[in-house]
Image: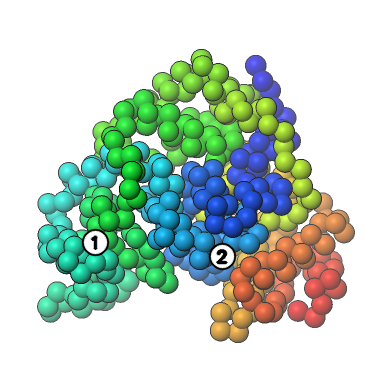
């Protein structure tokens, strides 16, 4: 039996998430692909209060990251693709075949409900890649809000989920749809995986990402898998886990009287050393997206409050978790104003257990400046910090902000 201390467990988790060391994945385009492969998926989200989720996640791990690198991988190299994980996400193209059963499930259940799908496929086949704006609303219909999608857009999304279409690239943030056969690279493996292969795929992918995990963590938010492909994911993962433990590929570890799984190689790899720094994370970062797990392993109770009515918000519309070493020290409410090129820090809250030191304040100031630079802002405004002394110290370091 392997009993992990809090420090050991968090070290494995943070190493697996690529949040230790200065360049955990290297640099350049190849680093972006390595990060996406290691993380199993990188979530795409429309909210851009500070930055798009996928850009934010990659910037925290790749110092020289630019959006052009992601476009290079998707559109030019075709080494990553978009599909649905627990949400819309970028994934490694080598994993494409493992999403075919879900695509087939969508096709069998919904293809007959899609109005005019043959016409849409015919247009894209003859005209080339198209966006939803290239299809006019049906006669007599108008768009009453962003949720009132025109029929063509609904059809495009359903054909995308069913696998007939893929997203070849994004222009701005708008999807460009093309026939799947024209997006897939030559030689891609399109064999349907067996149940055993799928179980092993989820285990290897999620454990490489999570470091240590329970069965529920590995199967996190995969309800659509069972519903659409008749695949009992928890049962299959449980069976594959037992087999992989027997072969030694997966190890069982214990933490605070609970059992977790991890890849055996993670126990043999030394933790990556690096200067202790404050990292401002996206609310959709792989490390924090599973809120229950975040509470269990990091004792951090976090909620993204943009989905709550303003009267019920405790912190702010879009607060960002702040990690210092292996501890979450607080949260940041910020907004990047593109017109004025200013990063406005509305408020900073530190956790009650956070020990304030000169080192922490200096690292927080460096993190804020780094965040400002990553967002392309020319200035930073510090409006409020709950801790008055921390606010004074930050203003001294940052200057008149």
Q: Which residue is mark 1?
A: 156
Q: Is residue 309 visible?
A: no
Question: As rendered, which of 135 and 76 lies closer to the eye?
Answer: 76
Residue 316's disc number: none
Q: Quadrant of the N terminus?
A: top right
Residue lying at the far bottom in this picture: please name it: 340
Q: Say whether residue 356 is left or right of residue 73.
A: right
Helix, strand or loop at mark 2: loop
Question: As rendered, which of 372 and 119 lies closer to the eye?
Answer: 119
Image spot of residue 151 (x, y percent):
19, 67
Residue at 43 percent across and 51 percent down: it is 79
Residue at 36 percent across and 25 percent down: it is 196
Q: Which residue is mark 2?
A: 66
Q: Quadrant of the C terminus?
A: bottom right
Q: Residues within 10 Å of mark 2 (few under 14, many from 20)?
A: some
Residue at 67 percent across and 66 percent down: it is 371
Image spot of residue 55 (x, y percent):
53, 61
Distance from Cα at disc 1 to Cα at disc 2: 28 Å
Query: Compared with residue 306, is residue 2 higher up or lower down, i.e. above or below?
Result: above
Image spot of residue 249 (x, y percent):
54, 23
Image spot of residue 87 (x, y percent):
41, 51
Q: Is residue 133 visible?
A: yes
Question: As rendered, which of 281 and 41 lies closer to the eye?
Answer: 41
Residue at 55 percent across and 37 percent down: it is 208
């Amino acid at each position: 039996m392997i009993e992990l201390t809090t420090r050991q467990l968090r070290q494995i988790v943070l190493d697996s998430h690529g949040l230790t060391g200065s360049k955990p994945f290297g640099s350049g385009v190849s680093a972006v692909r390595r990060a996406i492969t290691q993380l199993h998926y990188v979530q795409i989200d429309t909210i851009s209060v500070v930055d798009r989720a996928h850009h934010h996640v990659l910037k925290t791990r790749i110092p020289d990251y630019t959006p052009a690198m992601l476009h290079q991988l998707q559109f030019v190299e075709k080494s990553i693709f978009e599909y649905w994980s627990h949400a819309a996400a970028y994934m490694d193209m080598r994993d494409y075949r493992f999403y075919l059963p879900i695509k087939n499930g969508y096709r069998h259940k919904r293809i007959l409900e899609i109005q005019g799908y043959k016409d849409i496929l015919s247009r894209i086949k003859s005209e080339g890649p198209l966006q939803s704006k290239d299809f006019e609303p049906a006669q007599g219909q108008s768009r009453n809000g962003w949720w009132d999608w025109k029929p063509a857009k609904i059809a495009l999304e359903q054909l995308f989920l069913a696998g007939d279409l893929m997203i070849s690239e994004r222009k701005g943030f708008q999807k460009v749809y093309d026939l799947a056969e024209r997006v897939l690279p030559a030689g891609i493996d399109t064999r349907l995986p067996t149940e055993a292969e799928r179980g092993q795929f989820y285990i290897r992918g999620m454990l490489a990402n999570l470091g240590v995990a329970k069965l529920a963590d590995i199967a996190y938010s995969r309800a659509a898998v069972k519903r659409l492909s008749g695949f009992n994911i928890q049962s299959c993962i449980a069976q594959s886990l037992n087999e992989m433990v027997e072969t030694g590929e997966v190890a069982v570890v214990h933490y605070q009287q609970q059992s977790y799984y991890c890849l055996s190689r993670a126990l043999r790899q030394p933790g990556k050393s690096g200067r202790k720094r404050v990292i401002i994370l996206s609310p959709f970062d792989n490390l924090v997206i599973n809120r229950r797990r975040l509470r269990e392993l990091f004792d951090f109770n976090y909620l993204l409050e943009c989905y709550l009515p303003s009267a019920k918000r405790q912190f702010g519309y879009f607060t960002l978790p702040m990690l210092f070493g292996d501890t979450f020290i607080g949260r940041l409410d910020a907004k990047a104003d593109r017109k004025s090129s200013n990063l406005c820090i509305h408020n900073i809250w530190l956790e009650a257990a956070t020990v304030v030191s000169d080192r922490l304040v200096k690292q927080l100031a460096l993190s804020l400046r780094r965040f400002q630079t990553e967002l392309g802002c020319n200035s930073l405004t510090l409006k409020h910090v709950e801790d008055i002394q921390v606010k004074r110290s930050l203003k001294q370091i940052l200057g008149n902000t």
